[in-house]
Image (cartoon, rainbow, N blue to C red):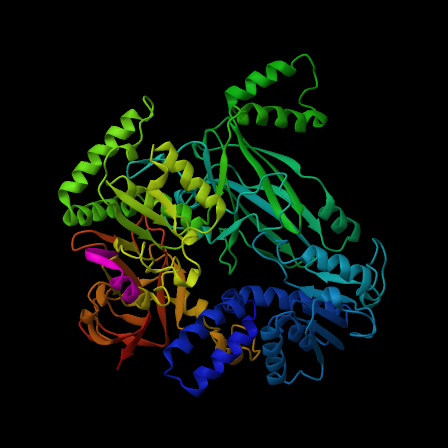
């Protein structure tokens, strides 16, 4: 409903009243991740970033900028830098209620509450003299994201120059800086690089044509949300973000680093132009052979003429990079001599890198021939025209009706997960053959006959005498083709629980392309009155043969209320029917990881240059870190993986609510975290590993409040508690 602040407040109170109330704790942890995003901890622990900002602010204040406005104050650290530097008047605005209240506590704890005026509002709503008495001489801000513009820095600085700042100093003017307006950061340069990266590819491009025997027709075009066409009017973030230096499998640069755009934050007219300018073309030569998967973007933030911060992948920085996946190309292979082309703009306050394309050397030569009549065809005026002509040659397609299907990156990774679909197909076939082997064989023969005849006589499957079908229900979240795969296994009536219309259309087109009768696949939410009552009988006198549940979230956690759903599902199964997965095994190991420690809590006042911030923001630390890639997480394993827990969805009496697990130490060190992952057991033989290379799931970890020193040969006892769908892991000492 959007009341995140209020929800967090009530969950926090519930935990304080009853610290053992696991439901309230889990819900508070989930909301805390929204309210105080994890990057706050990472940035506050970035001593280099804090020192550089502090130095730039000190310099500006010492040169005369004594009145300061901090836009997007967060914890108030930049405001306190300004006050410590000697600013007379410091104002700070923060929109988030949670962060505003936290900043009030932090400023008071550092005994600066009389010198810093905190405002719970957007800078765009600040009025003089209603909120601040007069224009200020310095604005400090770090309202930038991985794509530079995504936090609204352009809009807020346009407003600040027009309404809140003194006029800027013109070139050649001397005098006291306090008479003029100044902004930190002063400017930025945005850079990019085209890369090959299998991890980005599998999350943003469906790279296979057949999944467990199901053909994906070319008429269905899957796209990730990070893909935006040039004429889109939606103000959605047109990129994803990654810590490229830590991406699983690494990456290969296909071009040299190139400049995308410069922006002067001190020039009002330039800021206005950036927001309205049309996309400008960029053309970069390839230096390596490979698959074009994305353009990776970072920037250098020039705080003043002396101090700068870079978010480059080669820097040790708290920043991630913006990733613009290449999509909808006829061919992604690139080699030296080819060029990567794109168009860059700042539309809707986002940096947009659009129309990413490849100009092959062969295509380029063809187009160049058509331009040879004009001697100056490579002049500056014709560069854009040449790029456009080459792009049209590369992307021209026959006139075919296509259905675009936008999927989350985890849904695309799921489609690319071959072991997942093959595993489900085999497990479902086993269950259905055990229920009625002769019926399955007969029905499969019928399906084969129908497939052969579908292009000939037009005779349909329904004209043949068919036994009662098996009923299969897939209530996993998001886009899933498992119901279609089930339809290949015989006389099956499959039900999908997808909600979005474009997803339903895509599934219908896939069914049609695979010559399935229309009645094979139905959409279950059309049959139930309330979405909450999704688990019920297929018909009043029928039961399900298979129910597919979503047990693990993409984040790496167990789905909320999954055991309750499993209990209902067991009552809806025919004799011999199964829930998939039938049970889940949870594995974990002990690791030493300074990265996890620093991403989970601010490590004392030294990191924040002596300012007392850690105790306040650390109230919002959560013991569980999600969306981890264990394969690339900087850590040292101190034990072998061990089984922590078994969650049985089919046989609940096998579950235990409390378990102690002895873990043998195989390497000396400091235990800082317990990463964990799952094996989804479809049956006794077929397991899907959520930490596997093809997995669309991420992993999670419990981060210890206090690291534990261990030596080789010792044993550590983990206490694993399971209540409903909540699992907690603590170290018994």
Q: Is residue 573 magenta?
A: yes
Specify whether 384 is left or right of 556: right
Q: Position of residue 669 (x, y in %)?
A: 29, 70
As drawn, the residue found furthest toward the top would be 373
Can residue 562 be seen from the camera position used here? Answer: yes
Q: Is residue 263 above or below residue 156?
A: above
Q: Is residue 698 magenta?
A: no
Extent of the magenta region: 566-579
Q: Residue at x 59, y 18 (%)?
A: 367
Q: Position of residue 623 (x, y in %)?
A: 39, 73
Can residue 250 be seen from the camera position used here? Answer: no
Which corner quadrant of the image does residue 518 belong to? top left
Q: Is residue 408 above or below residue 487?
A: below
Which corner quadrant of the image does residue 59 belong to? bottom right
Q: Position of residue 85 (x, y in %)?
A: 69, 74
541 and 716: which one is in front? 541
Q: Split into 4 quadrants, where in the image is the N terminus?
A: bottom right
Q: Split into 4 quadrants, where in the image is the C terminus?
A: bottom left
682 and 173: which one is in front? 682
Which corner quadrant of the image does residue 690 belong to? bottom left
Q: Position of residue 213 (x, y in %)?
A: 28, 36
Q: Residue at x 32, y 68 (%)?
A: 564
133 and 666: which one is in front? 133
How many numbered callouts?
A: 0
Specify whether 50 is left or right of 160: left
């Amino acid at each position: 409903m959007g009341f995140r602040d209020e929800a967090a407040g009530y969950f926090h109170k519930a935990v304080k009243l009853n610290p053992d109330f696991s439901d309230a704790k889990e819900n508070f942890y989930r909301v805390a991740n929204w309210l105080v995003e994890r990057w706050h901890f990472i940035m506050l622990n970035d001593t280099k970033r804090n020192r550089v900002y502090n130095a730039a602010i000190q310099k500006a204040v010492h040169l005369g900028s004594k009145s300061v406005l901090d836009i997007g104050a967060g914890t108030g650290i930049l405001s306190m830098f300004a006050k410590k530097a000697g600013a007379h008047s410091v104002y700070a605005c923060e929109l988030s209620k949670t962060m505003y209240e936290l900043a009030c506590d932090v400023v008071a704890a550092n005994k600066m509450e009389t010198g810093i005026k905190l405002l719970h509002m957007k800078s765009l709503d600040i009025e003089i003299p209603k909120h601040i008495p007069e224009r200020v001489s310095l604005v400090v801000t770090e309202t930038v994201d991985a794509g530079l513009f995504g936090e609204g820095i352009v809009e807020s600085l346009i407003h600040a120059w027009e309404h809140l700042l003194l006029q800027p100093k013109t070139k050649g003017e001397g005098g006291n800086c306090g008479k003029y307006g100044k902004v930190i950061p002063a400017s930025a340069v945005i850079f990019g690089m085209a890369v090959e990266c299998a991890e980005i590819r599998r999350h943003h491009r469906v790279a296979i044509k057949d999944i467990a025997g199901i053909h994906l027709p070319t008429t269905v075009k899957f796209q990730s949300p990070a893909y935006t066409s040039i004429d889109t009017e939606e103000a959605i973030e047109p990129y994803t973000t990654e810590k490229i230096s830590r991406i699983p499998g690494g990456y290969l640069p296909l071009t040299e680093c190139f400049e995308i755009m410069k922006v002067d934050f001190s020039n009002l007219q330039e800021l206005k132009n950036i927001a309205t300018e049309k996309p400008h073309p960029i053309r970069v030569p390839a230096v390596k052979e490979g698959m074009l998967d994305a353009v990776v973007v970072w920037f250098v933030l020039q705080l003043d003429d002396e101090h700068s911060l870079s978010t480059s992948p080669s820097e040790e920085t708290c920043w991630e990079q913006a990733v613009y996946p290449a999509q909808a190309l006829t061919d992604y292979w690139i080699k030296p001599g080819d060029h990567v082309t794109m168009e860059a703009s700042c539309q809707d306050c986002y940096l947009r890198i659009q129309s990413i394309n490849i100009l092959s050397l062969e295509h380029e030569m063809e187009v160049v021939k058509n331009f040879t009549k004009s001697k100056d065809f490579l002049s500056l005026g014709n560069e854009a025209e040449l790029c456009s002509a080459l792009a049209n040659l590369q992307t021209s397609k026959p006139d075919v009706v296509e259905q675009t299907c936008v999927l989350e990156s985890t849904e695309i990774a799921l489609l690319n997960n071959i072991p997942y679909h093959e595993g489900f197909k085999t497990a479902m076939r086993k269950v259905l053959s055990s229920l009625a082997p002769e019926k399955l064989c007969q029905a499969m023969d019928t399906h084969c006959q129908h497939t052969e005849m579908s292009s000939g006589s037009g005779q349909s499957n329904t004209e043949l005498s068919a036994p009662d079908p098996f009923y299969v229900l897939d209530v996993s979240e998001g886009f899933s083709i498992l119901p279609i795969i089930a339809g290949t296994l015989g006389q099956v009536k499959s039900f999908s629980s997808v909600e979005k219309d474009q997803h339903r259309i895509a599934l219908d087109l896939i069914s049609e392309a695979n010559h399935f009768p229309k009645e094979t696949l139905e959409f279950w939410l059309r049959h139930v009155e309330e979405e909450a009552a999704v688990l019920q009988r297929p018909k009043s006198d029928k039961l399900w043969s298979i129910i597919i549940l979503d047990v693990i979230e993409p984040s790496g956690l167990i789905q909320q209320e999954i055991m309750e759903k499993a209990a209902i599902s067991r009552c809806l199964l025919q004799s011999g029917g199964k829930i998939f997965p039938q049970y889940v095994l949870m594995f974990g190991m002990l690791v030493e990881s300074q990265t996890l420690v620093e991403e989970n809590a601010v490590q004392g006042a030294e990191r924040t240059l002596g300012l007392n911030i850690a105790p306040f923001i650390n109230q919002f630390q959560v013991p569980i870190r999600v969306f981890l890639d264990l394969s690339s997480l900087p850590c040292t394993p101190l034990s072998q993986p061990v089984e922590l827990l078994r969650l049985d969805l089919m046989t609940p009496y096998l579950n235990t609510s409390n378990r102690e697990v002895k873990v043998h130490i195989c390497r000396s060190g400091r235990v800082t975290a317990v990463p964990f992952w799952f094996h989804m057991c479809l049956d006794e033989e077929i397991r899907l590993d959520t930490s596997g290379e093809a997995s669309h799931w991420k992993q999670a970890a419990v981060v210890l409040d206090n690291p534990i020193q261990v030596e080789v040969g010792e044993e550590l006892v983990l206490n694993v508690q399971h209540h409903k769908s909540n699992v907690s892991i603590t170290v018994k000492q």
